[in-house]
Image (cartoon, rainbow, N blue to C red):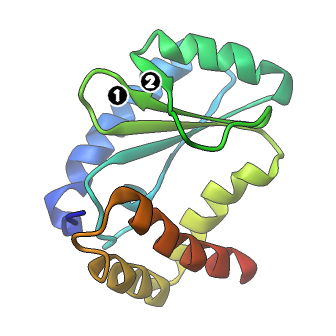
């Protein structure tokens, strides 16, 4: 696992977000489309990937997943999948993931985590330090280590 400083990736991620947001809204006009993940948090280091939250009404989630596949996404394998959450990843070489979430569900935690870090620079510093200790880790080991931090931040809300 290698991480990039915010100045080395965030501008590009914001540009990609704007493009994807427009495409998603053209397919699903009522979707709530928000930039999440490290690339949405000022000064956060990251792998340089882009995460997008796509909030839809619970009864529209499955149709939203089908629609988003037309943009070159497929369901992520070996990840949580529920009637309220589906994670999609790009099939066209971009490091982009969509979190398709039922509005009002517990999976709005993606937004709560982002907002907590945006509001508290000390949390961003802690998150960056944790990531730096994960240099060279496998993706699974990195994900496991950061999950405790995320849970702790969410418990502060």
User: Residue 58: where, in percent of width, then height?
Assistant: 83, 29
User: Residue 98: where, in percent of width, then height?
Assistant: 50, 36
SS label for mark 2: helix
Work out whether 37 lies above or below 100.
below
Single out the residue that lies furthest toward the left.
8
Residue on which disc 2 sits: 22
Can you tell which mark lies on residue 19?
1
Q: Quadrant of the C terminus?
A: bottom right
**Quarter of the figure with residue 126:** bottom left
User: Residue 136: where, in percent of width, then height?
Assistant: 22, 70
- Label pair 2/1, CB-CB below 8 angstroms: yes
Q: Residue at left 40%, top 61%?
A: 38
**Quarter of the figure with residue 1:** bottom left
Can you tell which mark lies on residue 155?
none
Q: Residue at left 61%, top 56%?
A: 110
Q: In whole angstroms, how far apart are the C-alphas of marks 2 and 1?
A: 5 Å
Crowd around label 2: few <14 · some 14–19 · many ≥20 (10 Å)? few
């Amino acid at each position: 696992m290698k991480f990039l400083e915010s100045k080395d990736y965030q501008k590009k991620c914001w540009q990609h977000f704007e493009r994807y947001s427009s495409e998603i809204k053209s397919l699903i006009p009522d979707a709530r489309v928000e930039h999440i993940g490290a690339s949405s948090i000022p000064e956060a280091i990251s792998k340089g990937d882009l995460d997008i939250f796509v909030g839809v009404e619970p009864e529209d989630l499955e149709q939203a997943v089908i629609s988003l596949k037309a943009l070159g996404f497929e369901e992520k394998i070996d990840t949580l999948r529920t009637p309220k959450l589906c994670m999609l990843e790009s099939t066209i070489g971009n490091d982009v993931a969509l979190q398709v979430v039922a509005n009002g569900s517990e999976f709005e935690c993606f937004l709560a985590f982002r907002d907590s870090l945006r509001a508290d620079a000390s949390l961003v510093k802690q998150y960056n330090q944790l990531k730096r200790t994960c240099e060279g880790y496998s993706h699974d080991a990195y994900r496991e280590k950061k999950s405790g931090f995320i849970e702790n931040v969410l418990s502060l809300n």
